[in-house]
Image: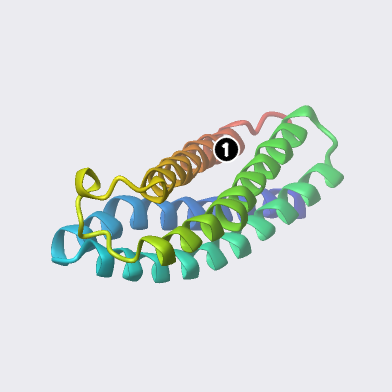
Amino acid sequence: MNFYSFTKHLSVFFIGVWIGMLALLGYGVAPEIFKFMESKTQAGLLNGIILHKMNILEWIAGILLLFSVIVSYVLKRQIKNLTALAVAALMVGLLFYYSRVITPKMEQLKTVIENFDVPMSEDPRSERTDFDRYHRQYSGLVKTNLILGIGLAFFISFNRKNE
């Protein structure tokens, strides 16, 4: 295996780690936390702790992914490598937005709301509406990264002409 092929394998590995974390938390852990725990407030606190740790791991995987696709592009300046670089950069950009812009806003709102066990119909404060809107944005961007990551993994894996 040459170094170029090695960087492609690394890229797919880092994507796999990243999307694996997203899928595990989004479909395996978070829903179960909210089903298992009686208090939505406590479930949200636990989920927030896990999300914080996961965001750190996402940054590691994202930076390593970006580095590996940059190296692939430097080694072979082809449109497919530039495409992979653009998608990886977009994924890291989305990660920045949901982990560094949306998350702090949600954390601030959680301190104001304090109790998520009160149904929204009984708590008409604008902070609840704002929190739900940010939560939908966060979830949508994470799902977008999951889809982009799966697509990028297939693109890199199966676009191997002239290698």
Image coordinates of residue 19 in percent, x first then y, are 47, 50
Q: Closest to the observer: 155 or 119?
A: 119
Q: Is residue 105 above or below residue 126?
A: below
Q: Closest to the observer: 163 or 73?
A: 73
Image coordinates of residue 58 in percent, x first then y, are 55, 60
Instruction: Identify the secondary structure beneath mark 1.
Output: helix
Image coordinates of residue 160 in percent, x first then y, are 65, 33
Three-letter amino acid code at the position of disc 1? Leu
Q: Which residue appears at 34% of the width and 56% of the height?
A: 24
Image coordinates of residue 99 in percent, x first then y, are 56, 56
Asked if one can make out residue 121 in the rendered structure from this viewpoint, the answer is: yes
Identify the image quadrant of the C terminus.
Answer: top right
Q: Which residue does the numbered mark 1 point to in the structure image?
A: 152
Q: Closest to the observer: 99 or 29?
A: 99
Q: Which residue appears at 45% of the width and 38% of the height?
A: 140
With 121 as the anchor, is 142 left or right in this view?
A: right
Asked if one can make out residue 1 in the rendered structure from this viewpoint, the answer is: no
Q: Which residue appears at 68% of the width and 55% of the height?
A: 6
Identify the image quadrant of the N terminus.
Answer: bottom right
